[in-house]
Structure formats: C-alpha cells, structure tokens
C-alpha cells in the first residue's frame, strides 16, 4: 500500500519545471537507464524531489543529477537512488523495516517511505537533519530519525530487513552488517573517492553473507562523529 502524501497539493504538484510531466520524464529516463522495478519507479514518480532542494535549485530537481544541499553534501542522483532502492528490495524475504545512514535532504528516506517501508534514518549533521525532518513531516511521511554517527546503526530498532548507506566509507561497516536480519540486504558505496562501487551484502536465511560489487558511483564521504 502506498501512503498518501500530505502536502499542499499545488506545492507538491509543482508547475513548469517541477510539474508532474517533468517528473514522468525523469521516470522514463530511469527506465531507459535500466531501472525495472515498477514499485521504485512509482515511488520516484510520487515523491516531489523539488521540495528536498533549495528553492533556487527546484527547476533542476528532475534532472538525473546530484545537487548540493549545503554543508558540502549532496542529494543523490535519482538513478542512484532508484538503483540502490531496487537492490534493497531484492531477495526472498519481504522487506518491512529499513535503516538509512545519511539522511541528507531526506529524499531517499521519502522514497523508501513511499514504498510503504518503516524507515529509520540517521544523520550526523544536525542542521541537515532538522530540515529533512521538517520536509518529511510536511509530506505526512512517518520516518523515524536520530542525530548520531550512523556507523553505529540503530541497534535498539534492529535487526533491519534492509540497510542503505548513502555516504562512502573505505570498507563495509561491521556494526551495520550485524544489524541485518536473516534475508536482509545492505547496499552501500564503498571505496576511496576516485573509485567507489556499490556493494550489496545479503544475509541468507541461514545467516551466511553473500557480497556482490556492482556499479561504479560517486558519493560524499562517510565521516565519524556528529556536527550541530
Ligand atoms: N540520502 C541523502 C544523501 C545525502 S549525502 C539524500 O537523499 O539526500 C550523504 C549524507 O550522509 C550527508 O548528509 C552526510 O552528512 C551524511 N553522513 C556522512 N557520514 C555519516 C555518518 N557517519 N552518520 C550519519 N550520516 C553521515
């Protein structure tokens, strides 16, 4: 079941460069780029990405590109959001809960919530988290969030059926893999800034871990500690 968006209709619908037509064109481009999961394409069609960037950038919100969100951080490129979300939904077991490390603008969390998942998200920069919370609340999206170093995960709410890391570390984080439920999937960018790849880790029902290295990507770094 897809939750309904609770935002002033005109604002969410957008106009001109933020209209539904422009959003549909983005979905078409993602399809051409190999995104096949209709649930994911539908979530991207539904979530108004222009409300997750500064007003000055709203007209570029439906280009398939990362955009700055302040504090040297970026809202991820829509294709990357779509691909990571698609990878999260793979595997045999149904997915109910998802942990995101790196809330940023809140857009990825909104896409996950639009899929009907129970979303937990952690952000180390307080300023970004406050803004993301406000946007998610305005859209009526029920996302739980905390201001912390996400590399420790959120053990009180784990284990999770899916874990998505939206900042790149030099290696996979063991504490996060430990919070993956049997049948669960973790997707994270891993590697040094010049050569990162998406890595997918699946915990089989018998507890065994499977790892696959997928597309090359570019993410901001996964850092330690918190900032106000
Ligand atoms: N998912 C976000 C992408 C934001 S960019 C979106 O849809 O907009 C990555 C984010 O990860 C940044 O906001 C950055 O501050 C955050 N981040 C980096 N290291 C982190 C850590 N250890 N814990 C939590 N957040 C972290």
Image: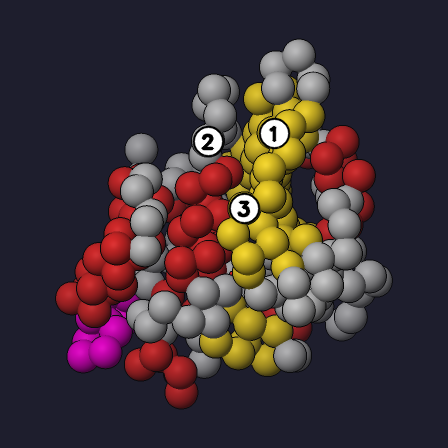
The secondary structure that dominates the magenta segment is helix
Residue 194: x and y, percent?
66, 69
Q: Which residue is mark 3?
A: 214
Residue 174 can be seen, yes or no: yes
Left-right relation of 173 to 217: right
Q: Which residue is mark 1?
A: 202
Residue 123 within the segment the image draws in magenta: no
Taking the spot 40% from the left edge, 58% from the top edge, the residue there is 79
Report the magenta residues as a range.
10-19
Which quadrant: the N terminus? top left
Q: Look at the numbered disc 1 and give the secondary structure of its residue.
A: strand
Instruction: Confirm or deny contact between disc 2 and disc 1 (CB under 8 A).
Output: yes
Q: Earlier in the sequence, mark 2 or mark 1?
A: 2
In the picture of the structure, the residue carrying the numbered disc 2 is 90
Residue at (61% x, 15% y) in the render: 205
Q: Secondary structure at mark 2?
A: loop
């Amino acid at each position: 079941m897809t939750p309904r968006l609770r935002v002033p209709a005109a604002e969410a619908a957008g106009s001109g460069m933020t209209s539904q037509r422009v959003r549909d064109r983005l979905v078409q481009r993602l399809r051409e780029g190999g995104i096949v999961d209709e649930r994911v394409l539908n979530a991207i069609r539904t979530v108004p990405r222009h409300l997750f960037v500064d007003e000055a950038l709203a007209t570029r919100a439906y280009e398939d590109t990362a955009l700055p969100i302040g504090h040297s951080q970026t809202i991820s490129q829509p294709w990357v959001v779509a691909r990571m979300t698609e990878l999260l939904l793979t595997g045999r077991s149904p997915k109910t809960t998802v942990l995101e490390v790196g809330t940023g603008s809140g857009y990825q969390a909104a896409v996950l919530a639009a899929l009907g998942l129970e979303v937990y998200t952690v952000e180390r920069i307080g300023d970004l988290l406050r803004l993301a919370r406000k946007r998610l609340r305005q859209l009526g999206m029920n996302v739980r969030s905390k201001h912390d170093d996400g590399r420790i995960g959120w053990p009180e709410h784990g284990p999770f059926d899916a874990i998505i890391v939206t900042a790149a570390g030099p290696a996979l984080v063991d504490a996060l893999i430990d919070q993956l439920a049997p049948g669960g999937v973790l997707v994270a960018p891993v590697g040094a800034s010049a050569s990162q790849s998406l890595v997918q880790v699946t915990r089989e029902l018998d507890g065994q871990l499977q790892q696959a290295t997928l597309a090359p990507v570019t993410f901001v770094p996964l850092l330690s500690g918190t900032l106000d």
